[in-house]
Image (spheres, rainbow, N blue to C red):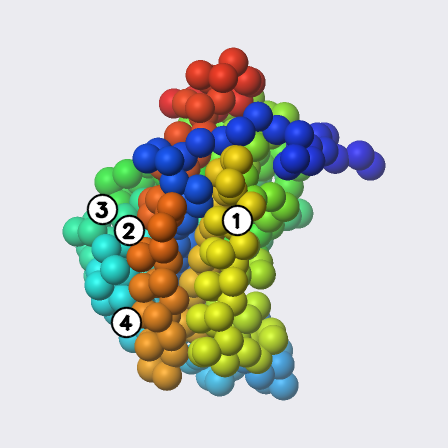
Amino acid sequence: MDNQLFPYSPIVERAPLHWPGGARVAFYVGLNVEHYQVDRPSTSTFPGTAGLTPDPLNYGWRDYGPRVGIWRVIESLDRHGLRASVLLNSDVGERYPQIIEAGRARNWVWLAHGKNNSIFQADMSPDEERAYLTDVIDTIEKATGQRPRGWMGPALTETFQTPGLLAELGLSYVLDWTNDDQPYPLDVPGMLSVPYSVELNDIGLFVSKGLTGPDFVQIVKDQLDQLHEDAADSGRVMSLALHPFVIGQAFRRRYLDQALEYVVNHPGVWSTTSDEIAAHYARAGVAAGERTGFSL
C-alpha cells in the first residue's frame, strides 16, 4: 500500500527553515526513561538468555539504567546546561518516582513513550489503542504535572491510526519516523514529525555495532559538523538518543561529557528540546503561509 501519512519531500526543494538567533542546527537530547517487565524479553546484550524467564543477565543490564546509569547522565546534562527531552514510559511514574522528581526540578520536557518497553500497540484495534494511549498520556500528566506534546512509541512502533489518535488526545508531534533532518507536517491535522535518530543512538552504536567511547565522540562531532555545513541555507535538527543502561555505564561517562562539550560549544547550535523545535517549526510555517496542521 502507499504511505498515506506523509508525502515525499526532497529537502533541497523546501522553503528555508530558520532557527532562533540565526542558529544552523537545533540540538536536543532524547533521553529514554523506561521500564521493562521482568517476564518478557526485550533489548538484550546477550541473546543466548533473552528468551528465559527470568533472565537476570539481560534484565539486570536494563535495570542498571534507573538504578545507577540515569544519575550519571543527569550529572552530565547538568554540567553542560542541557534539558532532556524525556521519552517516558508511563509505568516509570509509579516505579521510579525519584527520576520524575529529578526531571521536574530540571524542567525536563516529557514525551509519551508507551506504558513500558515490553508492550507494543502495533496489533491493537483502534478502540483498544485509543484506550491504551489515553491511559498512557493521562498517567504521565498526573505523574509529571505536564501533559505530553510529543510521542515516541516503544521501539518506535505505531499503527496507521496512531498519529490521528494522538491528535485527538492533544499531542502535536511524533518522533517515530526517522527519515529527515527537518520537521515536517504529517497528513493528519495537528501532527508533525520531528527528527529522531536510530543511527546517532547509543544502543545502535554501542550494542549493535560494538563501537568504543572514542568512536562515539567522533561520530557526534562528525554528525554535527556535517549538519552545520548542510544548514548554510536552511536549518537542520540533530537529536542524540540516549539510554541510561547504555550510556550511563561508568566507562562511557567521560565520552558522553566530551561529546556534549563539543556540541554546546559549537557555533551555530541551538541547544533546546523537541517541544521547542516543534513549536518553532509550526510558528515559522504559519508565518510563511505553509500548512503545518500544528496546534500551538
Q: Do tag 3 and tag 1 residues touch (Cβ < 8 Å)?
A: no
Q: Do tag 2 and tag 3 residues touch (Cβ < 8 Å)?
A: yes
**Mark 3 to mark 1 CA distance (whole Å):** 31 Å
**Mark 4 to mark 1 CA distance (whole Å):** 32 Å
Element under label 3? loop
Q: Position of residue 286 (x, y in %)?
A: 46, 17
Q: Which residue is mark 1?
A: 229
Instruction: Tell me which label, 2 or 3, sits earlier in the chain.
Output: 2
Q: Nearer the viewer, mark 2 or mark 1?
A: 1
Q: Which part of the image, by quadrant, shows the N terminus?
A: top right
Q: Which residue is mark 3?
A: 107
**Mark 2 to mark 1 CA distance (whole Å):** 25 Å
Q: Which part of the image, by quadrant, shows the C terminus?
A: top left
Instruction: Tell me which label, 4 or 3, sits earlier in the chain.
Output: 4
Element under label 4? helix
**Furthest residue to the left?**
105
Q: Residue at x 38, y 66 (%)?
A: 259
Element under label 2? loop
Q: Residues within 10 Å of mark 1 (few under 14, many from 20)?
A: few
Q: Which residue is mark 4?
A: 72
Disc number placed over residue 182 in the picture, else none? none
Q: Position of residue 239 (x, y in %)?
A: 46, 52
Picture quadrant of residue 245? bottom left
Q: Residue at x 60, y 74 (%)?
A: 208
Instruction: Tell me which label, 2 or 1, sits earlier in the chain.
Output: 2
Type of amino acid under label 4: Arg
Q: Which residue is mark 2?
A: 83
Q: Position of residue 50 (x, y in %)?
A: 59, 79
Type of amino acid under label 2: Arg
Q: Do tag 4 and tag 1 residues touch (Cβ < 8 Å)?
A: no
State the residue in front, 271 or 46: 271
